[in-house]
């Protein structure tokens, strides 16, 4: 009897969706910090979008993992979803995906703990998002079954280009507030 | 009437509150947001609280003092 490919398709679709949602959340976070559109976008809407899309991304990752366990194309145990290196299929690429998912979860759950760990430590931890995005990109390219498709390459290219572009904007263009006030960086020591 | 409170330990100088309500907030010399008024009728105070990425702004209802 031919195996039902439904879970395999679900795993691929949810993985790509999780990557798109992660990209959206990262971009919203960069827009919040760098304000390239000044006051054209409501800050409250960007903040809401940033958090909500990150949560949706984690949900998609959960579906991605569950579908991979339930599917018979690749043998993956529930334990292998949280312990990097236990998957025999493309072990390095899948391990990077596990690390990216754990990193994203860590960043997300750190928000309600921001008071306890301190805002400075929380901001440092948030830098981990760049590593999460890089790991997710390499994971998708190296482990994804759709990588050879033109549309998949376009997705990875557009996502990476957008995040790199927004990051460059953040670095090169000082943000302004209310159209005039320059914002000091809390991680940078104040001039004496 | 809304009472504005800012948790200085959480404010990370994003400045989203100033984008949302420049007439109510400003950044102090140390980069921490400061409310220009303690109490306001402006609904933008709520918008600023929602905009803060660190959720450092609390807006609560303040009773108007009887004349």
Image (tube, coloured by chain):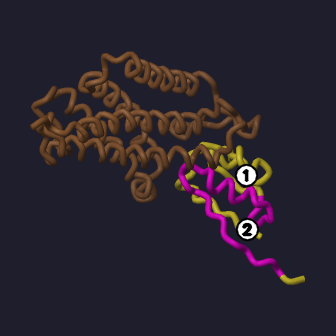
Chain colours: A brown, B yellow
Magenta-highlighted residues: B37-65
Q: Percent from the top left, x then y, of residue A106?
A: 33, 47
For mark 1, name the chain: B
Q: Percent from the top left, x then y, of residue A146?
A: 30, 23
Q: Percent from the top left, x then y, of residue A65?
A: 25, 43
In the image, are marks 1 and 2 on the same chain? yes
**Foreground mark, 1 or 2?**
2
Is residue B49 within the magenta segment?
yes
> Mark number for residue B2?
2
- Upstream in sequence: badge 1 or badge 2: 2
**Residue A20 occupies quadrant:** top left
For mark 2, name the chain: B
| Kind of element beneath mark 2 | strand
Q: Residue at x 78, y 64 (%)?
A: B40
**Residue in the foreground of this view, choosing between B65 and A146:** A146
Q: Residue at x 13, y 40 (%)?
A: A76
Disc 1 residue crowd, few under 14, some 14–19, many 20+, Cα 10 Å: many
The answer to whether the residues at label 1 and label 2 have Cβ atoms under 8 Å apart is no
């Amino acid at each position: 009897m031919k195996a039902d490919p439904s879970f395999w398709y679900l795993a691929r679709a949810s993985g790509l969706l999780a990557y798109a949602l992660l990209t959206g959340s990262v971009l919203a976070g960069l827009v919040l910090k760098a304000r390239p559109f000044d006051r054209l976008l409501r800050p409250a809407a960007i903040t809401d979008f940033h958090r909500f899309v990150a949560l949706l991304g984690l949900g998609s990752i959960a579906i991605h993992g569950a579908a991979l366990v339930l599917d018979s194309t690749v043998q993956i145990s529930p334990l292998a979803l949280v312990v990097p290196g236990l998957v025999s299929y493309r072990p390095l690429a899948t391990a990077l995906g596990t690390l990216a998912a754990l990193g994203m979860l860590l960043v997300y759950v750190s928000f309600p703990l921001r008071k306890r760990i301190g805002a400075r430590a929380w901001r440092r931890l948030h830098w981990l998002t760049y590593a999460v995005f890089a790991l997710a990109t390499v994971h998708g390219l190296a482990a994804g079954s759709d990588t050879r498709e033109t549309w998949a390459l376009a997705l990875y290219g557009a996502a990476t280009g957008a995040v790199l572009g927004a990051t460059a904007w953040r670095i090169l263009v000082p943000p302004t507030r209310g159209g005039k006030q320059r914002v000091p960086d809390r991680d940078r020591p104040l001039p004496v | 009437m809304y009472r504005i409170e800012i948790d200085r330990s959480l404010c990370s100088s994003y400045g989203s509150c100033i984008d949302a309500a420049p007439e109510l907030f400003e950044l102090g010399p140390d980069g921490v947001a400061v409310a220009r008024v303690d109490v306001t009728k402006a609904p933008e105070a709520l918008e600023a609280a929602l905009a803060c990425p660190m959720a450092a702004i609390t807006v609560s209802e303040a009773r108007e003092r009887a004349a």
